[in-house]
Image (tube, rainbow, N blue to C red):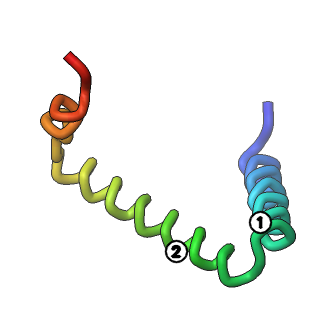
């Protein structure tokens, strides 16, 4: 079983790998844009969860019958 410190090291390593891969493939500014959009989407998702907003009505509009 991994302790808390080992899990943090593993997560930090994975984040570093993903960021370095993004920097090499898409460039600095697009990587910054991806990070900003990801944080914005995570914040909106957290707000939806906190206020129990149900988006199933929207999915029913776009599903095929």
Which residue appears farthest toward the front when viewing the image? 65
Residue 23 in which image quadrant = bottom right
**Nearest to the observer: residue 26 or residue 15:** 26
In the figure, 60 relative to 53: above or below? Answer: above
Q: Nearer the viewer, residue 59 or 49?
A: 59
From the viewer's perspective, tell me whether residue 31 is left or right of residue 23.
left
Q: Is residue 65 above or below residue 41?
A: above
Identify the residue shown where x is 27% and y is 58%: 47
Q: Secondary structure at mark 2?
A: helix
**Residue displayed at 20% across by 41% down:** 55
Q: Which residue is mark 1?
A: 22
Report whether 2 appears left or right of 56. right
**Residues at marks 2 and 1, CA–CA distance in whole angstroms:** 14 Å
Instruction: Please give the name of the residue rendered at 43% of the width and 59% of the height, measured from the top-left corner.
Output: 42
- Check disc 1 and report its element: helix, strand or loop: helix
* Residue 38, percent from left and from top: 51, 63
The crowding category of the residue bearing disc 2, from other C-alpha atoms within 10 Å (few below 14, some 14 to 19, many at least 20), is few
All told, the count of numbered labels is: 2
Q: Position of residue 51 (x, y in %)?
A: 17, 52
Quarter the C terminus occupies: top left
The residue beneath circle 2 is 36
Q: Nearer the viewer, residue 4 or 48?
A: 48
- The percent coordinates of residue 12 (x first, y second) are 77, 60
Residue at 37% x, 64% y is 43
Q: Is 61 displayed left or right of 6 in the figure?
A: left
Query: Where 26 falls versus 44 (above or below)?
Result: below
Image quarter of residue 19? bottom right
Q: In front here: 51 or 1? A: 51
Quarter of the figure with the N terminus: top right
């Amino acid at each position: 079983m991994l302790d808390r410190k080992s899990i943090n090291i593993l997560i930090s390593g994975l984040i570093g790998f993903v960021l370095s891969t993004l920097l090499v493939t898409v460039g600095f500014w697009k990587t910054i844009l991806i990070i900003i959009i990801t944080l914005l989407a995570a914040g909106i998702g957290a707000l939806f969860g906190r206020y129990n907003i149900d988006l199933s009505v929207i999915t029913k509009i776009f599903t095929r019958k």
